Image: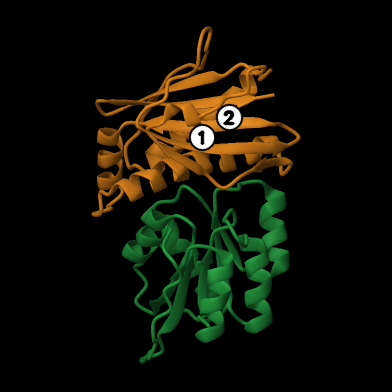
Amino acid sequence: MASANAKASPLTGGKLKLMICDDSNIIRRKIERELQIERLQVIATAANGKLAVEAFRKDPADVVTMDITMPEMDGIECVENLVKIKPDVLILIISALSDKATAIEALKKGANGFLCKPFTDRQLTEALEELLRGAGNDD
Amino acid sequence: MMTKVELETFVEGTTHYFATAANQPASVGSPYIVQEGKPTIQEFTGMISIAGKRRGIVYFTASRPMLTVMLMRMGETELTQENMCDLVGEVANTISGNARRDFGKDFMISVPTVVAGEPEKIVTPDNIRSFVIPINWRSHSAQLVVCLE
């Protein structure tokens, strides 16, 4: 699995910093490749919750996409940690766990939205746009 | 022993995965029981251990040519062995995770274990029957194997 990859993030023009956390390399690359929202710029990717927290401490993202089932630290625990560091971070859970209880637990811990895997490009864009609208960050 | 309704959850999950993630529907056949020996293992296998209210394993097994085309259909340009291992794990993880919609949160799934070749590393419990769900996609065939108490 790839490791966390925190890059420097000198963002301009009101762009929002995005971190992608998923233990699947192909899902991380898919989200990065299919991102169609100009205001979001990927600054870091992480293969598990622990690496995501490390990258987030160095450079807190504004928006995070978060898997749940991951080694080392799962997405629910990671959400709790990220919200402690930056309470206004926007977190979209992207997970195959499709039961209501999991979605509710993630939202209670501080996530702002839930997208179920598998997803299309359009569903990803719509979920991220809804997340930004909900936080008043739409254009 | 699994019920017909429970197996239908995995058939639907498999159908949904290919239509959505691989951008092309698969023909998913009726599940059958492995009568003798072990279920089929192809070149790449992604396996999920199930714990909680149900116990057992779920695995997805496919050939390199099929995974190559799947990755291409997903827009992936790096057709590496590493990404093929990643893909079989992700397919098994997604279908098993989606099954929680029907099985509930006590259907606890592990992170995927991936095996390239080495069929001896895939061990199904001797006391549980394995159901094979045949998948035909383009000119390729793969299997989802469900082995639950």
| Rendered location of residue A58, percent (x, y) | 52, 85
Is residue B21 in view from this perspective?
Answer: no
Q: Residue at x 62, y 60 (%)?
A: A74
**Which quadrant of the structure image shows residue A28?**
bottom left
Q: Is residue B29 left or right of residue B75?
A: right
The residue labelled by disc 2 is B9
B59 w.r.t. B71: above or below: above
Measured Cα–Cα span from mark 2 to mark 1: 6 Å
B100 w.r.t. B58: above or below: below
The chain painted green is A
| Rendered location of residue B101, percent (x, y) | 64, 40
Mark 1: amino acid: Gly
- Quadrant location of the N terminus of chain B in the rendered image: top right
The chain painted orange is B
Kindly check if marks 2 and 1 are in contact, taking CB atoms under 8 A apart as contact.
Answer: yes
- Check the image and name the residue furthest to the top: B35
Question: Closer to the camera, A137 or B47?
Answer: B47
- Quadrant location of the C terminus of chain B in the rendered image: top right
Question: Closer to the camera, A81 or B128?
Answer: B128
| Rendered location of residue A12, percent (x, y) | 36, 92
Mark 2: amino acid: Thr
A28 w.r.t. B50: above or below: below
